[in-house]
Amino acid sequence: MEFRGSSVYDEAEFFTNYIKRRERPDSPNTAIEGPLMYELIGGFKGKRILDLGCGDASFGRDLLNGGAAFYAGVEGSRNMAARALSNLDGVNGMLFNETMETYSFPSNQFDIVTSRFAIHYVADINQLFQNVLTSLKETGRFIFSVQHPLTTSSFISKQSGELRENWVVNDYFLDGERKEPWIGQVVVKYPRTIEHYFRTLTQSGFTVTDLREGTPKREHFSSESEFKRRQRIPLVLAFSCVKGQR
């Protein structure tokens, strides 16, 4: 059986194992992607923020506690949405238990739209980026991360186990879905080249102001060996964009 979008997180055993994996020391989400996203977002006090594929919304809780004016999270998984509602209890946040494809984007409502490790589940990014553009205020910002396309171009190296020591790059330029064996399940993802993301963003009406590949920094790792392992291949691709200003 294969899973699309956020549906895999509603599979009980997968969800339990994912949470354990996500909370392990030196998780790439915590040691690489998280610090990078905060750096790209920069100042957010007094800002209205939309978070696509928000997961458990712990990011939203932290943004609100750090001074954001309002936070809306969009999450398709029922299991993740339940955790998100708990994390947003008592703060100025809302949760929409919908996918990025079914969510009704309001016009000119947000200062920042963000998404963390989620857009690679979406088949049609042309429509998604147009919806994001519509929902942003003038000169609003769009900051998002995805799995680096080098890591999703081939899954042959996963045959040696989840803890890969080598990575095979193959079929990098081929468009379309890829079926990744991940935590005991098969998950459908849509890897795209860096060029593809850049061209789609600019054609949608964004100006790309920064692009990062998640260079590991020693201060974010508790393990020297894990830090060195993560220097071998990029795991994260992140963009910072502004509405208009072309």
Image (cartoon, rainbow, N blue to C red):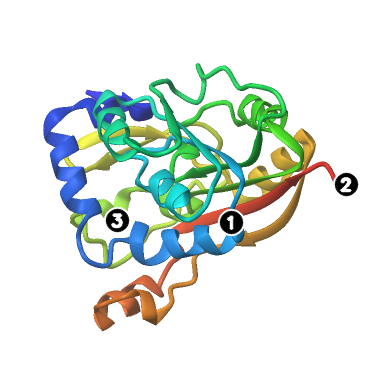
User: What residue does disc 1 label?
Assistant: 41
Give the residue type that dot 3 points to: Ser
Binning the other alpha carbons within 10 Å of mark 2 as few (below 14), some (14 to 19) or many (20 upward) gives few
Residue 128 picture location, percent across and down: 61, 28
Q: Which of the 4 quarters of the picture holds residue 185? A: top left
* Gap in angstroms between the C-alphas marked 3 and 2: 41 Å
Q: Amino acid at mark 1?
A: Ile
Kindly identify the residue that appears in the image at 14 percent across and 40 percent down.
16
Q: Which mark is residue 157?
A: 3
Distance, label 3 to label 1, CA atoms, is 33 Å
- Mark 1 or mark 2: which is in front? 1
- The numbered mark, 3 or 1, whose residue comes first in the sequence reads 1
Q: Amino acid at mark 2?
A: Arg
Q: Is residue 44 left or right of residue 223?
A: right
Coordinates of residue 113 in the picture (x, y in percent): 59, 40
Element at badge 2?
loop
Position of residue 142 in the picture relative to residue 204 (left or right): left
Q: Residues within 10 Å of mark 3 (few under 14, many from 20)?
A: some
Q: Tell which tag, 3 or 2, sits nearer the viewer.
A: 2
**Any mark on residue 139, and which?**
none
Q: Residue furthest right?
A: 246
Distance from label 1 to label 2 (Cα)?
20 Å
Q: Disc 2 marks which residue?
A: 246
Q: Residue at x 38, y 80 (%)?
A: 219
- State the residue lying farthest toward the front: 90
Along the line of sight, which residue is nearer the eye, 74 or 25? 74
Q: Is residue 101 left or right of residue 2?
A: right
